[in-house]
Image (cartoon, grey):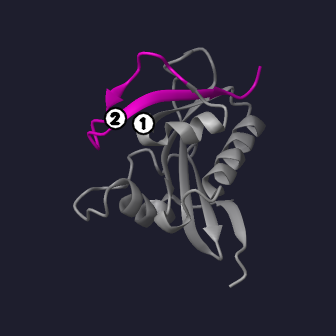
Amino acid sequence: MTNTFEVRRVAPEALYDLRRRVLRADNPEVSVAYVRDTEETSIHFAGLLDERIVVSASLYPTESPINPVLNAYQLRYVATDFDVQGKGLGGIVLDAVEEELKSLGVEQVWANGRDTALDFYRAHNWQLLEGSEHLSPETKLPHTIIYKLLLS
């Protein structure tokens, strides 16, 4: 094993297994396909460790709840496989996501971040929208709206 890590754009279906295992407690009854996955403007990234998808991130152009006049994308379905969590691979993918969005002229990226992942996002200079704490309608887990300005 060479332990090479690569970030690349992929079809959304390539991410469904990781989404299900990490974000939906491996429940086969829960759909991990999103209605917007196949839209032309949606972007899907995979972090591959020796060709195995270990990180996922998907992006959709969506009006920002922080500043609706900015060109914004919403980040969803960020997952890091259990055996590589805490090794910095999710951060590498997040950096690649932000660079891609900047190259497209996107001004802000935002997400409904799981409260258990907020320290990860803070470490990458994301901000929390005060008073935005809520339970996800999909998972019933606590989330907070988070965001990052990409262009000034």
Q: Which residue is mark 2?
A: 142
> Looking at the picture, how far across and down is residue 116, in whole percent?
43, 42
Q: Amino acid at mark 1?
A: Asp
Q: Secondary structure at mark 2?
A: strand
Q: Which mark is first along the chain, 2 or 1?
A: 1
Residue shown at the point (26%, 62%) measured from the top left: 27
Q: Is residue 42 left or right of residue 152?
A: left
With respect to residue 82, does 60 lie above or below? above
> Which image quarter holds the N terminus?
bottom right
> Looking at the picture, how far across and down is residue 72, in whole percent?
60, 28
> Which image quarter holds the C terminus?
top right
Q: Is residue 149 rendered magenta in the image?
A: yes
In this rendered view, identify the residue nearer to me: 38 or 25: 25
Residue shown at the point (28%, 42%) measured from the top left: 138
Q: Amino acid at mark 2?
A: Pro
Q: Is residue 51 left or right of residue 132?
A: right
Q: In 3D space, how far apart are the residues under numbered discs 1 and 2 (Cα atoms)?
A: 6 Å
Q: Which residue is mark 1?
A: 115
Q: Secondary structure at mark 1?
A: helix
> Looking at the picture, how far across and down is residue 17, in whole percent?
41, 66
Q: Which residues are magenta?
A: 128-152
Q: Callout 1: 10 Å neighbours few (<14), some, many (20+)?
A: some
Residue shown at the point (43%, 29%) measured from the top left: 144
Q: Callout 2: 10 Å neighbours few (<14), some, many (20+)?
A: some
In this rendered view, identify the residue nearer to me: 98 or 2: 2
With respect to residue 29, does 72 lie above or below? above
> Looking at the picture, how far across and down is residue 139, in whole percent?
29, 44
With respect to residue 27, does 109 lie above or below? above
Residue shown at the point (54%, 56%) measured from the top left: 56
Tags 1 and 2 touching, CB below 8 Å:
yes
In this rendered view, identify the residue nearer to me: 47 or 38: 47
Tell me the tag on residue 34. none
